[in-house]
């Protein structure tokens, strides 16, 4: 017998713990961030209970359903168009008054709602007592208390959802939100007019539509009233009512309706909430006095970010060496198992060398995301956005834009999608153009490789400086955009500062593993394929003639080694000569190959930056994904390398004098990787969110910026005597 299906939407404010509840209900692993804008698209999960299959849809976190921002529109459209059987309204118990504003709008829509008072333990610690039975009667909705990050109370939510569908909740009713004497009569009168309108049959609630029309919501008006004659009648009635409200109150109906909702909420709060003596946010304010201090806040922020990057390099260095050693053993084992020839070279030099060179940096990626997740879940990132609000205003943006920009340090794609939380289209487009300058985790692998190879103990500081350069570049570009394409005023903004919380191990580990699994999937997919393709392009065609007879000379030297008649010093000289000959032959072969020809074609453009053709090829392949820069270098710098017990990894191959890479070259290369066009996924995300013109603008300005800055670093360094 097939299970009956129930569709359940989860709606709530940012920081209400909605996604934690979704995870607990469905087992889905999702990112849980303690600041607005984490969930920007609805996600779906499933659970079974008492003969029912429940489909849970995690809607974007939003403070209202006014549809000013994209995430508000996504949430409202889903509730109207898909009509879920149940809406679980997830509320932060410690911030009941603010959260109930969304609840009033759900009541207006006549949704069948369950009030989930989440973070119940925090409310108790704050000394907040909520009379849940009275609140249930006032709102006409069942109440469930939960602790999302522990999964406590989720079984009660499942039971409540099924009971609500089966009409077993005695308190369930669609309680109307009343707006006071000035406008309530007008709402009732307009509702009656809408009920007579034959073209309003699709409307989820006639009273809700009346409220929307009085608020001047033109999109809602056109969505539900299709008959032009009926629309004209209603518009005349609305204009008359709006004039009446303005004469009587001196305010627009939208303001009166908003005040009415807050008045309704205030009445509920007086009925159901009591506080113990003491300030429930006192501890958070004491911490904020230091962390958001106008002078101390900035160095503390920089120190915390520096600490994350130092840990990324210093701690990550140990597992890096283990993985590098493991990749080397695997390559040697496969080399010994297979006969010499094309297949051996393809697997060892192409697949293993290319993918292995990227796999080495997995620990660094995991440590970076561990640090970012801990800062997010603790509530500090919201403080960072608040702290940066003044700086962002100087850029022509505001603090809320800082949130997706910080997300860009993880991955630019979800960061660009997170700009949907910005109400202003101007702010959204500007932020989208700046996000690619925030160095994503894929670029981190490149920095760790070059900084580790050429800067030793200073590597962590160099990486931190590269990230700061990205921020500085964003500041400069923002100033240019503000004075040219985006001259409008900055939209007003109020940043919510949630209480500090101790990050849960589960949440932090889930976040870290999500990013690590994406990295691993790339290695097993696109990076592996790219490594093989790059190796093939570097393998064929072979030159018909060499500058010298490598075969005969190599064969003679190998015979001398086999005879073992030479002294230890002579044997070492023979081995060095043999290594040089093999490297020379490989160099001529790869320069004659297709990949060599491509590299030689771009070399004139990048030569002023100190890059040779191999670095140029890696930058070209990096357009697909920045991790491929590493796999390309792993193939190009290790192709044809003789496998011996002393064989070293890519780091030493780059450091080898024959690579012609100096510390200055490596610094210029890191700057170019930081600033040039992001991966193809980011480019497509920009197109999807901002359009084709903005996509081309982003690609063009980043290429110009990257070349210019790398030129300044390399040529300026040479003038100052660096190498």
Image (spheres, rainbow, N blue to C red):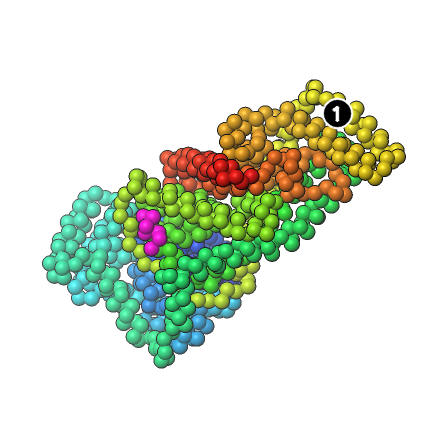
Q: Is residue 152 magenta?
A: no
Relative image position of residue 249 (x, y in whole percent): 14, 61
Quadrant of residue 587 in the image?
top right
Q: Which residue is mark 1?
A: 550
The residue range painted magenta reads 390-396
Relative depth, front residue between 559 and 64: 559
Relative image position of residue 34 (x, y in whole percent): 44, 60
Relative depth, front residue between 373 and 200: 373
In this rendering, the answer to whether 540 lies above or below 107 is above
Relative depth, front residue between 387 and 338: 387
In the rendered view, does 224 fall on the left or right side of 505? left
Dominant secondary structure, magenta: helix
Relative depth, front residue between 607 and 75: 607
Relative image position of residue 500 (x, y in whole percent): 44, 67
In this rendering, the answer to whether 183 lies above or below 222 is below
Q: Is residue 391 magenta?
A: yes
Q: Residue at x 16, y 59 (%)?
A: 251
Quadrant of residue 282 in the image?
bottom left
The residue most toward the bottom is: 277
Quarter of the image for the C terminus: give it.
Answer: top right
Q: Residue at x 75, y 35 (%)?
A: 576
């Amino acid at each position: 017998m097939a299970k009956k299906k129930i569709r359940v939407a989860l709606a709530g404010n940012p920081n209400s713990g909605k996604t934690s509840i979704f995870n607990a209900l469905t087992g889905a692993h999702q990112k849980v961030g303690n600041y607005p804008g984490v969930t920007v698209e609805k996600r779906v999960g499933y659970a079974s209970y008492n003969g029912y299959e429940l489909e849970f849809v995690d809607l974007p976190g939003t403070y209202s359903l006014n549809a000013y921002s994209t995430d508000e529109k996504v949430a409202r459209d889903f509730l109207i168009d898909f009509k879920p059987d149940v809406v679980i309204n997830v509320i932060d118990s410690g911030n009941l008054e603010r959260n109930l504003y969304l609840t009033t709008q759900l009541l207006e829509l006549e949704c069948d709602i369950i009030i989930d008072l989440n973070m119940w333990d925090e409310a108790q610690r704050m000394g907040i007592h909520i009379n849940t039975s009275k609140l249930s009667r006032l709102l006409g909705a069942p109440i469930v208390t939960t602790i999302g990050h522990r999964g406590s109370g989720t079984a009660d939510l499942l039971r409540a959802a099924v009971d609500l569908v089966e009409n077993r909740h005695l308190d369930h009713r669609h309680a109307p939100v009343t707006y006071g004497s000035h406008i309530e009569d007008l709402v009732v009168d307009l509702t009656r007019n809408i009920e007579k309108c034959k073209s309003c049959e699709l409307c989820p609630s006639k009273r809700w539509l009346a409220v929307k029309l009085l608020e001047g919501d033109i999109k809602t008006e056109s969505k539900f009233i299709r008959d032009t004659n009926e629309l004209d009648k209603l518009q005349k009635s609305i204009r008359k009512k709006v004039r009446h409200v303005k004469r009587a109150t001196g305010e627009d109906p939208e303001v009166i309706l908003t005040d009415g909702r807050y008045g309704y909420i205030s009445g509920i709060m007086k009925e159901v909430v009591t506080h113990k003596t003491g300030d429930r946010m006192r501890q958070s304010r004491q911490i904020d006095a230091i962390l958001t201090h106008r002078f101390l806040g900035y160095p503390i922020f920089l120190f915390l970010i520096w600490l994350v990057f130092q840990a990324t390099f210093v701690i990550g260095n140990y597992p890096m060496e283990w993985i590098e050693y493991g990749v080397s053993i695997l390559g040697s084992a496969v080399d010994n198992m297979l006969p010499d020839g094309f297949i051996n070279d393809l697997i060892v030099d192409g697949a293993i060398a290319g993918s292995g060179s990227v796999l080495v940096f997995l620990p660094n990626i995991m440590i970076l995301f561990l640090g970012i997740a801990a800062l997010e879940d603790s509530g500090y990132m919201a403080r960072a956005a608040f702290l940066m609000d003044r700086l962002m205003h100087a850029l022509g943006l505001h603090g809320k834009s800082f949130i997706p920009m910080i997300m860009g340090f993880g991955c630019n794609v979800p960061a660009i999608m997170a700009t949907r939380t910005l109400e202003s289209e101007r702010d959204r487009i500007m932020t989208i153009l700046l996000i690619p300058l925030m160095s994503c985790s894929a670029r981190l692998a490149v920095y760790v490789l070059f900084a580790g190879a050429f800067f030793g103990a200073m590597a962590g500081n160099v990486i931190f400086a590269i990230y700061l350069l990205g921020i500085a570049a964003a500041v400069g570009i923002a100033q240019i955009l503000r004075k040219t394409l985006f001259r409008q005023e900055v939209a007003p903004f109020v940043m919510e500062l949630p209480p500090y919380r101790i990050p849960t191990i589960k949440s932090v580990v889930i976040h870290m593993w999500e990013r690590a699994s994406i990295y691993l999937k790339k290695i097993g997919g696109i990076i592996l394929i790219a490594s093989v393709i790059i190796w093939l392009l570097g393998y064929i065609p072979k030159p018909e003639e060499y500058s010298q007879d490598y075969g005969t000379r190599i064969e003679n030297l190998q015979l001398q080694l086999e005879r073992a008649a030479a002294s230890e010093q002579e044997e070492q000289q023979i081995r060095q000569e043999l290594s040089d000959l093999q490297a020379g032959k490989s160099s001529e072969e790869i320069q004659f190959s297709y990949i060599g020809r491509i590299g030689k074609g771009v070399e004139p453009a990048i030569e002023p930056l100190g890059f040779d053709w191999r670095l140029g090829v890696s930058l070209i392949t990096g357009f697909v994904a920045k991790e491929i820069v590493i796999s390309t270098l792993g193939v190009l710098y290790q192709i044809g390398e003789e496998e011996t017990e002393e064989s070293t990894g890519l780091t030493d191959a780059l450091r080898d004098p024959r690579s012609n890479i100096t510390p200055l070259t490596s610094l210029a290369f890191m700057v170019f990787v930081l600033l040039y066009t992001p991966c193809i996924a980011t480019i497509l995300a920009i197109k999807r969110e901002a359009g084709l013109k903005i996509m081309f603008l982003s690609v063009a300005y980043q290429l110009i910026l990257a070349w210019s800055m790398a030129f300044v670093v390399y040529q300026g360094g040479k003038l100052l005597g660096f190498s």
